[in-house]
Image: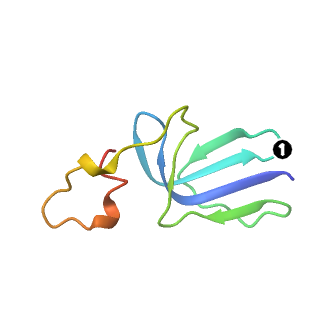
């Protein structure tokens, strides 16, 4: 399969949030090869995914949450409910 690049994504790395991140990984091994903020060039044989509007999370062991107890700030959009715990 080769390299896969996900760009323009909100990245939570387990400790902090990175806006407009670009993550490159080897899809045959699942190994992340780089994380930076540059948009990818058009490369032959590379799968490029536009992650605009998406959040990329690490592979948590138990990543579920209970949204019923989360309070959003006044005026916040309910679509932000998954970002509120971050």
- The residue that label 1 is drawn on is 28
Residue at 40%, 38% in the rendered image: 16
User: Residue 64 or 80: which is nearer the viewer?
Assistant: 64
How many numbered badges does the structure rendering display?
1
> Is the C terminus in the top left, top right, bottom left or bottom right quadrant?
top left
Could you tell whether 7 is left or right of 44 in the image? left
User: Residue 48 or 84: which is nearer the viewer?
Assistant: 84
Residue at 12%, 62% in the rendered image: 74
Residue at 34%, 66% in the rendered image: 79
Name the element at disc 1. loop
Which image quadrant is residue 17 in?
top left
Residue 44, image x and y in percent? 84, 64
Residue at 75%, 40% in the rendered image: 30
Residue 18, image x and y in percent? 44, 48
Residue 1, image x and y in percent? 87, 53
Report the residue that reaches farthest toward the left.
74
């Amino acid at each position: 399969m080769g390299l896969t690049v996900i760009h323009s994504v909100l990245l939570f790395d387990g400790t902090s949030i990175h806006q407009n991140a670009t993550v490159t990984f080897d899809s045959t091994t699942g190994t992340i090869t780089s994380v930076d903020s540059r948009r990818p060039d058009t490369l032959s044989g590379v799968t490029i995914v536009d992650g605009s509007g998406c959040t990329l999370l690490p592979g948590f062991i138990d990543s579920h949450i209970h949204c019923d107890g989360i309070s959003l700030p006044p005026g916040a959009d309910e679509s932000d409910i998954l970002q509120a715990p971050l």
